[in-house]
Amino acid sequence: MQQVIRAERPHNTHASRSMTDMSETRGMKLLAGNSNRELADKIAEYVQLPLIKAQVRRFADMEVSVEIQENVRGEDIFVIQSTSFPANDNAMELLLMIDALKRASARRITAVIPYFGYARQDRKAGPRTPISAKLLANLITEAGASRVLTVDLHAGQIQGFFDIPTDNLFAAPVIVKDILEHMGPDNLMIISPDVGGVVRARALAKRLGADLAIVDKRRERAGESEVMNIIGDVSGRSCILVDDIVDSGGTICHAADALIEKGAKTVCAYATHGVFSGGAMARIARSGLNSMVVTDSIAARDEMDHCPNIRRISIAALIGEAMRRINNEESVSSLFD
């Protein structure tokens, strides 16, 4: 007996594109798993193609079952699947979809992973610990993926974990557009919530022509942080905290409180991936943040409806345009020139 998790839905293929006119796609097809169907539908609208008819289901004991229900022989297939919560289930769905396509003689299989889970385990943090990001990269490659397309990897060196072409897109253009629309270009100060995020924050500050400040913090144990100092004068400024992942929300919320204590006029935060584990949303709702903006790389949870200062922006057009360029053998990096 099999339990169906999510059935195929009809798809509207008559959407307009916001980045560039769509040239004819060559044997391009899209397959989506269950991790983030909303984003997959938006990407499909952008490229004006329906999702492949397929069933990604569970047996009674929760084993994953995949069945591709149309011919994909010789096609250029893009498999859209974030490895977000539940990370192990979604990763297994991705691997089995890739394997099914390989055995169905797809010409090229691109794993489109808007959020690459296990990316924070990118090195041996201690003795007798795994490098989980490398293991997942190996599994995706061995399953039969021809290339990988992802967004804002937690560590850039993870690209080197793959032995196949890997495109790491940046959400910065989408974030910059939203900042300018909601805050304007004046009096902005970009804030890195820790020293490790300075490169990311500096790149965004350069795009906006804004100043940069850094939160110097000391993390006593996993999941907890203590703000020590603000490097830079934030008094009277509109401060924007920038990070790639918001998980427990502790770092962002502590940084926001410290900025307010130092006289910041307003404090907003932008992150590519809203993991929001544990009580993160409640913590953000109680914080001094005017807004916490994340992309739709991870599917929205119902709790977001009850958190007034969390807002989502879409990266569907960014991913869809990169997919179109890959299909047409065009440059992806020029998206960020």
Image (cartoon, rainbow, N blue to C red):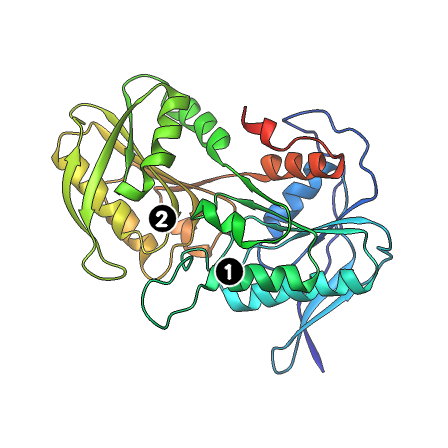
Which of these two is toward me, 25 or 167? 167
Label 2, secondary structure: give it.
loop
Label 1, secondary structure: give it.
helix
The vertical placement of 107 against 318, above or below, is: below
Q: Position of residue 131 (x, y in %)?
A: 44, 63
> Going 12% across and 33% down the picture, which residue do you hit?
262
Of circles 2 and 1, the one toward us is: 1
User: Mark 2 sits on what residue?
Assistant: 307
Q: Position of residue 44 (x, y in %)?
A: 70, 43
The vertical placement of 76 against 57, above or below, is: above
Circle on res. 6: none
Image-based side of 242 in relation to 318, left or right: left
Which of these two is toward me, 77 or 43? 77
> Going 18% across and 28% down the picture, which residue do you hit?
232
Q: Position of residue 238 (x, y in %)?
A: 26, 26
Which of these two is toward me, 225 or 2? 225
Marks 1 and 2: in contact by CB < 8 Å? Answer: no
Q: Mark 2, residues whose alpha carbon is within 10 Å: few (<14), some, or many (≥20)? A: some
- The span from disc 2 to disc 1 (Cα, nearest Å) is 35 Å
Query: Split into 4 quadrants, where in the image is the C terminus?
Result: top right
> Going 71% across and 36% down the picture, which residue do you hit?
324
> Going 34% across and 41% down the picture, which residue do you hit?
309
What amino acid type is highlighted by mark number 1?
A: Lys
User: Mark 1 sits on what residue?
Assistant: 134
What amino acid type is highlighted by mark number 2?
A: Cys
